[in-house]
């Protein structure tokens, strides 16, 4: 099915009559998402786009897996308001009593885990994770290509040398039962803050985005071995 909406419950047909009417986004609902432990989840992946010629893009192999806090069931009229079963947004789920926090570096069995831990579990179940990454790369490359006209416009600012610029985008991706990735949205200013304290680098602690003892681990997500050139 499809879904549209606007502030105040406006009629979408008004947009064709009023040039100042709010815009609408229509998406096809994915009714057979890949589940893990009976829970629906999505992936927040980070993409670095450079301002150099061609706007090369790099996909980090690490990111966040964000889980719902209630078991998933195919949507019906009876359960369609069960937002903790259908919506993976952390801002919503972490307000619920079932939100699970974990002190494990990879998120353990918590409601927010590392992408690497999810990929590892999929590999243990026999999934071709390398093929999955290739599909994700294709998705990212196609999306960045579609954005290129906007990047060119931004690079023509007379007081900015694009060669000195970069942008980190947050790609929200969901997998279906066949391990096909689907793009939910792209965030131009994804949050990079931390809301948990976990041991890293042999016991040192990182909390609220600030390293007590800065070291190589603080930039591990964007070290060359973790980046995949994708556009």
Image (cartoon, grey):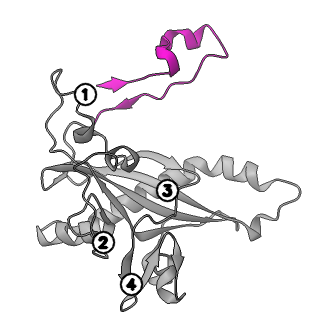
Cα separation between marks 1 and 3: 27 Å
Q: Residue furthest right?
A: 158
The answer to whether residue 15 is magenta is yes
Tell me where residue 101 appears, x and y as whole percent: 28, 62
202 is higher (above) or lower (below) than 231: below
Quick check: 4 left or right of 148?
left
Tell me where residue 93 appears, x and y as whole percent: 32, 46
Tell me where residue 8 appears, x and y as whole percent: 50, 16
10 is higher (above) or lower (below) than 3: above
Which residue is identified by label 3?
170
Secondary structure under the numbered disc 4 in the rendered image: strand
First in sequence: mark 3 or mark 2?
2
Secondary structure under the numbered disc 3 in the rendered image: strand
126 is higher (above) or lower (below) than 15: below
Which residue is identified by label 2?
116
Magenta residues, start to end: 1-29
Cα separation between marks 3 and 4: 23 Å
First in sequence: mark 1 or mark 4?
1
């Amino acid at each position: 099915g499809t879904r549209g909406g606007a502030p105040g419950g406006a009629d979408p047909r008004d947009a064709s009559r009023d040039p100042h009417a709010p815009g609408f986004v229509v998406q096809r609902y994915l009714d057979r998402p890949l589940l893990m432990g009976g829970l629906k989840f999505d992936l927040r992946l980070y993409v670095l786009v450079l301002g150099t010629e061609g706007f090369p893009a790099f996909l980090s192999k690490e990111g966040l897996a964000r889980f719902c806090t209630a078991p998933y069931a195919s949507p019906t009229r009876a359960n369609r308001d069960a937002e903790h079963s259908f919506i993976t947004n952390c801002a919503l789920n972490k307000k619920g009593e079932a939100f699970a926090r974990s002190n494990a570096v990879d998120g353990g069995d918590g409601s927010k885990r590392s992408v690497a831990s999810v990929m590892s579990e999929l590999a243990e179940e026999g999934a071709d994770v390398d093929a999955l990454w290739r599909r994700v790369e294709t998705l990212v490359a196609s999306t960045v290509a579609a954005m290129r006209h906007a990047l060119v416009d931004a690079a023509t600012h007379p007081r900015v040398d694009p060669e000195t610029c970069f942008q980190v985008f947050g790609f929200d991706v969901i997998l279906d039962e066949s391990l096909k990735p689907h793009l939910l949205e792209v965030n131009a200013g994804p949050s990079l803050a931390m809301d948990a304290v976990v041991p890293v680098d042999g016991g040192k602690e990182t909390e609220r985005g600030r390293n007590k003892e800065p070291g190589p681990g603080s930039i591990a997500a964007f070290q060359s071995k973790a980046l995949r050139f994708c556009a």
